[in-house]
Image (spheres, grey):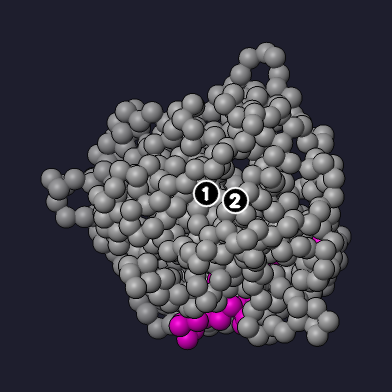
Amino acid sequence: MLAHFRMRYPGLPLHMLSSPRAQVHSSTASVRKLASTTGTTSLPRLPIPDLAKTLDKYLTSLKPFLLEDEARGGTPYNEAFALRAAWVDNFKHGLGPTLQTRLQELDKNSPNNWLDDNIWLKTAYHGWRAPLIVNSNWWLSFKNDTTIPGSVYLGLEENPQLYNTGLTRWQVRRAAWLVHRVLDFRAQLDRQEIYPDTSKTGIWFRTSAEKIFNIARVPRPGCDAFSSRPPKGVPASRTIICSIRDWFYAINVLDENDNLKSPAELEQQILQVAADVGSRIGAGEEAIPISVLSADHRDTWAQNQAHLLSLSSTNREILDSINDSILGLSLDHYTYVLPTAYPSPRTPLPTPDSSAEVDAHLHNLRSGHPSHPGRNRWFDKPFTFIVESNGRAGATGEHSPVDALVPSMVADYAVVQSIDNDAFGGPIESVDAVSSGNGGQDAEERARTIVQDSDDSVLWFDAYGAEWIQEYARMSPDAYIQMALQLAWYRTQGNFTATYETALTRMFKNGRTDTIRTFTTESREWVLAMTDSKTPAHGIHNLLRRAIHAHSILTRAAMVGRGIDRHLLGLQFVLRPEDGKQHEIFEDELFLHSQTWKLSTSALSAGDQFRGTGFGTPEHDGYGINYMTGPSLIKFGIESKHSCSTTSTKVFKEAIVTALLDMRQICCSVPLAHL
């Protein structure tokens, strides 16, 4: 039975689609970590670092900035450092202990931890008013499914069109399979058949993964919030939101007992949705792209949403259905191709996994088709599958509930197993076709401006990978790559910059992240040596090892709750008017400069199931870089801004390649016996 609801203004129909109850379909066997029958474990609370140690580490982190300033004719290092040391000493024996005590009291009154419950979500995400598109949401390209014929990815035959919608049969089948795999994964988590609560990793992941389902970010003036998670039994809690050509449909994916429907049932429901869209197109209807409003400035979106809700109670029901749904599914009626990429005369689409093809896919995942950005997406949802007409797939998501590692682990499970046609009752058969000026326009124009400025591309470095770095160079792959990024930046900019790398604090209850400050005295010395032709190879190699060792120490400290940036943020947070003016260490221009992350970086998994990923740079004249380090292949997702004259994703990609090749040469010039 098909019933539809229409927003009073400006006209968003949401279609509630139901089907008969089904038995749980069990996909082919997956590797499972069975729960122990004896007891459970728990995660410790996130510690508040020692005040004196944080301040000492902070002083140390300022040294490379002060040395660089002196080298460029600024204040002598000893004088500048002595001034900061005096401010730190005054803070350590004055206001600092008072603020530390307040943090401790805050922690005592917090259900989970002092940081996540009170500070981080608002400061880093919900208080930020920039549009989510490019600026905040992550995007992730999946490897191609080997069950789908190669000719389909090239846009040739074997992929029947559906109901004059532009959608195709292989597209729908892959969408149904991905949705089923994720929901099966979620069910196994709930049953503790994988990642059980008997391990700390299990507790962290299960708690984190649940945060991406049945929820959405809600725009509010000044500071956003999360929607309330629906209780079991609410019909919308058993649905996904499927969008096609800007129409949104709620599809029941669980029965009344919360049992997962089979892949074949999911496929049939999506086909019914496509048929309904086809009939609407045939009748001359055109959906108004309300979804683009979710890509707008957060305060503007808050105003527009409040207006929509004021017009009709039906609009509230529709919005609640979107927010309460498990996840999003966007089916695009096209396969995007870069304007500069011309396919072979024999095929309408570029060769799969070519750089132009992967970049085009990432661009569509990031923001939708550049000619009409922001459409057919709901940017407030934490997890949305996106499948294009030739079957290539990926995901995007709102970043605030969890960091991108969590949805990437969920997606990994969805992608690792190719489509099982037997689960759908057999191979694909053709389907007969059926007969068949507003605020949104302004929002789309603003989204287009953001998208056109985004210089986003992927780099596949295949000369070597983690295996060589570990076994031959005998260094930490992550720290090694961070040094390559330092070198690439210096060679392209002629200066150094504060660099952010994400460290996970997942060993703690509701732990999330802290900062690894990659730019250190040791990394600076190494980079300068790499640009000095007089420094011998063995000397450069020794400096590289020192820089990597220093980075590894910072990494371990951040992961165990002894990072400095979240602690400093907390100390600022508990300042009160009666404390007088802010302390000198917070007013120091170097305090802000040392946290202006023109290199914002994050590492993901080895990326076997993914072709590329990305997030936007937080600074206009910087880079947002996500990388995946496999045994023999390193994948970088790099974003910068076309409007910035000092950055270029293409130039930076070339600089990364050169840096990695030069580093290998340095390592190979030192006999293994000397290591």
Q: Is residue 600 magenta?
A: no
Q: Nearer the viewer, residue 120 or 64?
A: 120
Residue 174 located left or right of residue 102:
right
- In the image, the segment drawn in magenta is 631-653
Residue with the mark numbered 2: 273
Where residue 277 appears, as percent x and y from the top left, is 57, 57
Residue 386: in sight, yes or no? no
Residue 14 located left or right of residue 608:
left
Where residue 142 appears, as percent x and y from the top left, is 70, 57
- Tell me the quarter of the image containing the C terminus: bottom right
Q: State if disc 1 and disc 2 touch (CB < 8 Å).
A: yes
> Alpha-carbon neighbours of circle 2 within 10 Å: few (<14), some, or many (≥20)?
many
Where residue 339 appears, as percent x and y from the top left, is 63, 83
Residue depth check, mark 2 versus mark 1: number of the one nearer the observer: 2
Q: Nearer the viewer, residue 360 or 293?
A: 293
Which residue of the protein is positioned furthest toward the front in this rendering? 435
Q: Residue at x 47, y 46 (%)?
A: 4
**Judging from the image, what secondary structure is the residue with disc 1 in?**
strand
Above or below for 502 versus 200: below
Q: Mark 2 belongs to which amino acid?
A: Val
Residue with the mark numbered 1: 249
